[in-house]
Image (cartoon, grey):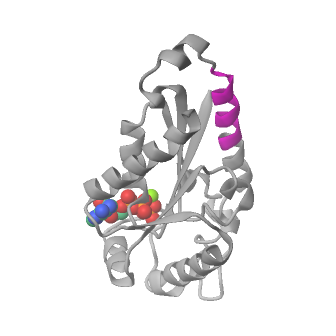
Amino acid sequence: MKTFIIGIGGVTNGGKTTLAKKLLQSLPNCSLISQDDYFKPEAEVETDERGFKQYDVLEALNMDAMMTSVHSWIRHSKDVEFSEEKIKTESQFENIINFLVIEGFLLYHYMPLNDVFNRRYFLTVSYEECKKRRSTRVYEPPDPPGYFDGHVWPMYLKHKKQMERVVREIVYLDGTKLEDDIFSYVYGDIRTAAQQLTT
Ligand SMILES: Nc1ncnc2c1ncn2[C@@H]1O[C@H](COP(=O)(O)OP(=O)(O)OP(=O)(O)O)[C@@H](O)[C@H]1O
Ligand SMILES: [Mg+2]
């Protein structure tokens, strides 16, 4: 069975999880992997001289475990075979593709992961909007005072710059648009890109 792997990257509070869950509900044969599920335990995450836990870096994540999940999904999906007949007669091309949505804040910096994507999206919001949205959330562990300006935002800018230098074919999305509008655009774009797999 053909596979189509979608990356939903971007800034913290850009709306990655929101968009990924909508895609999960709307695409047939779709699974979701969230990078936030692969943070190392707190005790293994480095602390800088200001006492800030260094969560917004690749080293805070267990990327080997995340890749194991991705590869096991790929293996399993490739094993699912449809008959020649179904492939020939299926009018909805989506029904002969297995979709995987992978969402997270550092998807395109780890090359083994970056290489698996058929389509890469990246949600952005301004500093002000991001700080405002983040201040309404409670993370585990909670952000200490000064964490956004001292760690989260500078790391985001650094990673974005690196990504822009190295990674090609990223579709940037304005995370301040209406949730439904972002979803409709991405859904249509995925359909167009995935259809090319079946022709
Ligand atoms: N298009 C949007 N417009 C306005 N608010 C949004 C939009 N998308 C998401 N939000 C809100 O922004 C907040 C963050 O959304 P979400 O959890 O999807 O972001 P995220 O990028 O996954 O963040 P995190 O860094 O925690 O993983 C939530 O309160 C959500 O309701
Ligand atoms: Mg999220």
Q: State whether the magenta stretch is mostly helix, strand or loop.
A: helix
Residue beneath the point at 64% across and 71% down: 57
Asked whether 167 or 56 is in front, the reply is: 167
Which percent across, then down, holds residue 180? 26, 53
- Furthest toward the front, the residue is 199
Q: Is residue 159 left or right of residue 14?
A: right
Q: Is residue 188 visible?
A: yes
Task: Give ligand 1's quarter of the image.
Answer: bottom left
Which percent across, then down, holds residue 169? 58, 63
User: In the rendered image of this protein, does residue 20 appear above or below residue 92?
Assistant: below
Image quarter for residue 160? bottom right
Image quarter for residue 100? top right
Q: Is residue 10 left or right of residue 130?
A: right
Q: Please tell me whether residue 74 belongs to the stretch shown in magenta.
A: yes
Residue beneath the point at 71% across and 31% down: 75
User: In the rendered image of this protein, does residue 48 appear above or below residue 167?
Assistant: below
Q: Is residue 44 left or right of residue 159?
A: right
Which percent across, then down, holds residue 15? 38, 61
User: In the rendered image of this protein, does residue 165 appear above or below residue 23?
Assistant: below
User: In the rendered image of this protein, does residue 125 appear above or below residue 84?
Assistant: below
Residue beneath the point at 53% across and 37% down: 99
Residue beneath the point at 47% across and 70% down: 11
Asked whether 97 or 112 is in front, the reply is: 97
Question: Which region shows up in magenta?
Answer: 70-80
Q: Please tell me whether residue 120 belongs to the stretch shown in magenta.
A: no
Which percent across, then down, holds residue 199? 56, 34
